[in-house]
Amino acid sequence: MKKYVCTVCGYIYDPEVGDPDNGVDAGTSWEQVPEEWVCPLCAQGKDAFEEE
């Protein structure tokens, strides 16, 4: 699965890890991440991410 990086802070969303602290289970593809999810480091929305 492809990883996505926050263009603001550099946080990398890895689908194999997910973001369980914020309700996104491991194995969740980027397309399945809820639209209201925000970067856990800088609180930017999904639109601030690009494919790594």
Image (cartoon, rainbow, N blue to C red):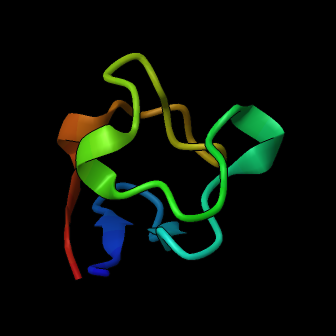
Image quadrant holding the C terminus, namely bottom left
Residue 48 drawn at (x, y percent): 24, 45
The answer to whether 16 appears left or right of 29 in the picture is right
Residue shown at the point (52%, 42%) measured from the top left: 39
Q: Nearer the viewer, residue 16 or 52?
A: 16
The correct choice, above or below, for 5 with respect to 48 in the image is below
Residue lying at 47% horizontally and 68% vertically, measured from the top left? 15
Instruction: Single out the residue that lies furthest toward the right.
Output: 21
In the drawing, does residue 4 fall left or right of residue 13?
left
In the displayed structure, does residue 14 sit left or right of residue 20? left
- Residue at point 54%, 32% (across, down): 43
- Across and down, in percent, residue 22 comes to 72, 34
For the point 62% across and 41% down, which residue is it?
A: 24
Identify which residue, 16 or 46, lies in the foreground.
Answer: 16
Q: How many marks?
A: 0
Please determine whether, in this image, residue 9 is positioned above or below residue 33: below
Q: Position of residue 19 (x, y in %)?
A: 67, 51
Q: Residue furthest front?
A: 27
Quadrant placement of the N terminus: bottom left
Question: Relative to 20, is 52 above or below?
Answer: below
Viewer-proximal residue among 29 and 22: 29
> Measured from the top left, where is residue 11 in percent x and y?
52, 66
